[in-house]
Image (cartoon, rainbow, N blue to C red):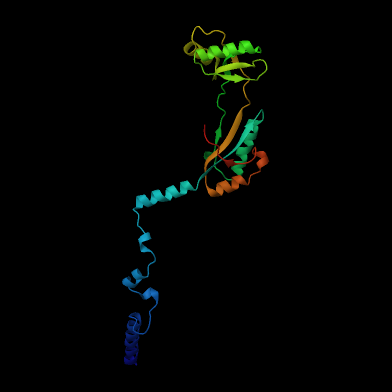
Amino acid sequence: MLRAAVGLLLLANVLFFAWARGWLGEAPRHGEREPARLAAQVRPEALSVLPATTASAAVQAARAAALVCLEAGPFVGDSALNELSLAEALLVQAQVPASAWNRIEPAAAPVWLVFAGRYPDAVLRNAREDDLQKYKLNYERIDAPADLAPGFVLSRHVSRDEAEAWIKTRVPAALRGLRVVQLPAPPASYRLRVPRADSEQAERMRNLPADLLAGGFKPCAARP
């Protein structure tokens, strides 16, 4: 009995060896030796093995490329800050962490003008324009507001002191008749920006109610 079992085991090993060698027909691909595996490759030249640091950098670059910058706004007027707070609450509901967004605050508006005018008389207006050209000063003509136009703006500034300093340093003493005037400040305008939103965050943000977000989240405007 034992001899029969040993004989069967030996025969099975011989048959398996012959099968694996392909003597009994084509063996399955998983039984191929390395030369056969190499011959079966498709475009092996397209495969390259990167060092661990390079591969990690490539993964990070791919992830960064998938991130998008989205912003909502502008939020303008007396209710701007309340609307901005509501927009931030909606981001919390959309599972966007507070560290992921920032408020884009309004920059100081250049509402102080170095001004020449008002010249409703065309003769006086043309004479003043000739003076400005004579002294090689840049200027722009304005037709509003009514209490200043028509006239000429030579520069715009964020404070009276800055405008007066500009006159002292840039305007020849012989040129008279310039003054500093203030325009009404434009209403404050805020934006809510998520500069690096991943695809899931971006999808949730785009699905937030646009009427509560000054039109909804859109691709970020170019920075000034």
- Measured as percent of width and height from the top left, residue 6 is found at 32, 88
Residue drawn at the location 65% of the way across and 11% of the way down? 121
In the image, residue 85 above or below residue 180? below
In the image, residue 59 above or below residue 8? above
Q: Is residue 118 visible?
A: no
Q: Is residue 65 left or right of residue 153?
A: left
Q: Is residue 133 left or right of residue 7?
A: right
In the image, residue 173 above or below residue 85? above
Which picture quadrant has residue 188? top right
Residue drawn at the location 34% of the way across and 80% of the way down? 20
How many numbered callouts? 0
- Measured as percent of width and height from the top left, residue 162 is found at 51, 16
Residue drawn at the location 37% of the way across and 83% of the way down? 25
Q: Is residue 217 left or right of residue 99?
A: right
- Measured as percent of width and height from the top left, residue 175 is found at 52, 8
Q: Nearer the viewer, residue 203 or 45?
A: 45
Residue drawn at the location 62% of the way across and 10% of the way down? 124
- Measured as percent of width and height from the top left, residue 108 is found at 55, 24
Q: Nearer the viewer, residue 38 or 170?
A: 170
Quarter of the picture holding the N terminus: bottom left
Q: Nearer the viewer, residue 102 or 151?
A: 151
